[in-house]
Amino acid sequence: MLSVDTVLRRDGIEIADVSCRHGAGRGDEAEHADQHTLVFVRRGCFARSANGVVSLLDPTAAYFMNPGEEHRYDHPHDDGDDCTALILKPGLVASLCGGEPRLPTGAIRTGPALDLEHRLLLAAARSGGQHEVLAERAIMLAASAIGQSDARRAASGRPATERARRAIVDGAREALAAEPSRSLPELSGELAVSPHHLSRIFRSATGDTIARHRMRLRARSALERLAGGERDLARLAADLGFADQSHLCRVVRLETGTTPSALRASLAA
């Protein structure tokens, strides 16, 4: 009846493709949520009863779940439904929601931009996109949905001044220069700002996402190693945190317009 295909698990967030093939009728009683989850409906229609409220959910809606929440799903049609679920660890929920590890309750309407982003995110995760980039996108998507439901909580953790924003961006760059593998939640915890706001102010100040900046640092480290005579590209990729040699070659080509093999001779000359 219900199948869940997890396509990404990283940095305190999971992306899952959820399919339900329940026939028309009233759902089972007293199901309980066991994780913090944001669910976007892609296809179908169903009613969710939780906290004394019945929400009709279709592809123009999304809803939040918190652990321990009792709910029931009723299905008006026989053809089931398909959803995209973002499952968030408590620490990430707290950082996105002003320190309280609890998501908003109930359903929200999803406008065209929010709906398209969750579909593109799922497609990218299914096709094996870079995990660091996908995790950052997923966190931003969750933050946008939380902000739509409760703008006050989503605004907490926002740097108040331009000087504070610049100091935070510089702090993130300093931390990434020392260890590029630091995740967005790890950086935001060190800098005492929400992941959502750190991602936004970083991109505003630098023109790059944190994931892109991380890849640029790794690419520059690769160039330095190539200039030093490194010949083993597989070892270079592993040492610098690339997924594999092909990933290293793609990133270096994107950054420089040519391949590591071609660069090696000219840099070491």
Image (tube, rainbow, N blue to C red):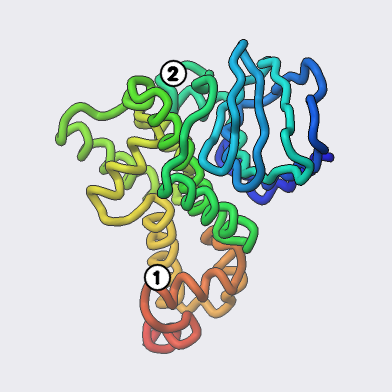
> Mark 1 vs mark 2: which is more N-terminal?
2
Quadrant placement of the N terminus: top right
Q: Position of residue 98 (x, y in %)?
A: 40, 20
- Choose between 11 and 57: the one closer to the eye: 57
Q: Disc 1 vs disc 2: which is toward the camera?
A: 2
- Choose between 34 and 62: the one closer to the eye: 62
> Residue most toward the top?
52
Query: Relative to 7, is 130 above or below?
Result: below
* Alpha carbons under labels 1 and 2: distance apart: 41 Å
- The residue that appears at 74% across and 19% down in the rendered structure is 32
- Choose between 73 and 208: the one closer to the eye: 73
Q: Tell me the kind of residue under disc 2.
A: Gly
Q: Label 2, secondary structure: give it.
A: loop
Q: Where is mark 1, residue-wise? A: 224
- The residue that appears at 44% across and 77% down in the rendered structure is 253
**Taking 198 as reference, is 67 left or right?**
right
Q: Where is mark 2, residue-wise? A: 99
Q: Position of residue 162 (x, y in %)?
A: 15, 35
Q: Position of residue 205 (x, y in %)?
A: 23, 48
